[in-house]
Image (cartoon, helix red, strand yellow):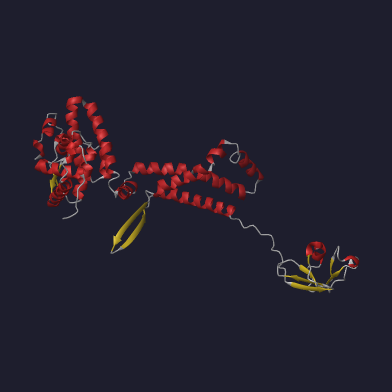
Amino acid sequence: MSGELLSRVEEILLLVVWDLGDGAYGVPIREQVGRLLGRKLSVGAVYVPLERLVAGGFLRTVDGDPTPVRGGRRKRYYHLTPRGLRALKETRKVTERLWAGKTAWKTGRA
Amino acid sequence: MGGEDGLEDRASMTPAQPGRRRRGRLERLLSRVTDEGIAEAEWGDLEEEAAVIRQRHGRLVSRMWIWLQGIRLILGWIPRDPRFAARWVREVAMEGWTDGGRRLVAVLGALAAIPAAVLVVSGLLYSLSGSRAVEQALDSTLFEPQGLVYRVLLHPVTVLGGLALALTLNLIPLLRIRLDRQSGNLIGTLAVRLRAAHLAVSAVGLTLLALILAYAFTENFAVVPRPPAAAKVEAAVAVGAGWTGVRPADGEWIVHEIAGVPLALSASPSRFMMFESCRSWSLQVGPELSSDTTRTRELVPNCTWEPTP
């Protein structure tokens, strides 16, 4: 894999899904992202990129069972795919290369 | 799996509602802008979070929250799915009609076509009846320029806009268009459903449109006879006593003295015009002026078939 870079939102979502493991569905993903960013995103701001990642093969989904509290609707669990993992590693490498040697920011110099 | 997470556990403290709840309008709309399974899961997540909000802030706040988030979710899907427009046209505009919706659309279309029908029928009556009484009746009612009927009902925007609305409303539920790609070729299929009300309104609308366009075409592009083209003037040469004259085709006479001094034909154009039809010319200085040729020269045509003036 080369050149498959993720946007910041995509990277965050993949990391959160990875972190949540088997419990990664819409509600906890949105909560976790909100905790990380310090503000709660709208539902659409989370679900739409999640489905884009599914369409891109970075995530796969598994339907859960319907539950009463959801009005009998199923959950949609997200799981990181090998391709998603590779994209995360690649994005991290690029970020690290970009940051390499950039220590002067503490003193305010470019 | 997800049942252990805090939110659902907290939400589960509310009385459970077994079985699938009836879908609301927003949820149905969501399922039209995205996949059915995705819509179900997303709306389920909204319901789950709304249950927690209901416990904290009450039912009204939770319903408002779920509506607001639902709308934002729907809006979030619309621009991000490039196939949305095609899907919407196929599943909503072409397929998603209830019987009641179709009846309503047919009636609305028929109402919208009324101004065009009035215009066409009254125009035909006016021009074909041949009755002075009918003409006067129409002039004083429909075709009265200051009248409300003329200014509103027969306004071009009302007539053509209504017709366009009628056709749009009734052709969409009638037609089914498919585009398929097969081995590199794009194949289009157009199917027309046999739905009597839509077919009738569409047929009437198309007929009215054709009549209006035909009338506008004949009025705007009526054949008006042109004035007859001027007769072609042929080239000619004239020779007179001490003068030569040359007229190129479609040109004017240029007359020279043999000594080489040019003299404009405009000296006496009216007299030249009298002999324009002569093929053979001889020009000479008029006898009355021959004694003073340096001051005034009158060109007198001498047509061989006409007597010398």
Image label count: 0
Between B187 and B94, the residue placed more toward the observer is B187
Rendering coords of residue B227 (x, y %)? 69, 60
Classify B169 as above or below B63.
Answer: below
Between B1 and B12, the residue placed more toward the observer is B1
> Quarter of the image holding residue B309?
bottom right
**In screen coordinates, is B138 left or right of B241?**
left
Q: Quadrant of the N terminus of chain A?
A: bottom left
Rendering coords of residue B55 (x, y %)? 17, 26
- Report the residue at 20% width, 25% height from top: B57
- Report the residue at 32% width, 50% height from top: B86
* Residue A59 can be seen, yes or no: no
Between A2 and B61, the residue placed more toward the observer is A2
Rendering coords of residue A103 (x, y %)? 15, 41
> Quarter of the image holding residue B43?
top left
* Residue A36 can be seen, yes or no: yes
The residue furthest top is B57
**In screen coordinates, is A79 left or right of B260?**
left
Between B20 and B60, the residue placed more toward the observer is B60
**In screen coordinates, is A29 left or right of B77?**
left
Q: Quadrant of the C terminus of chain A?
A: top left
Classify B10 as above or below B196.
Answer: above
**In screen coordinates, is B309 left or right of B152?**
right
Rendering coords of residue A15 (x, y %)? 14, 43
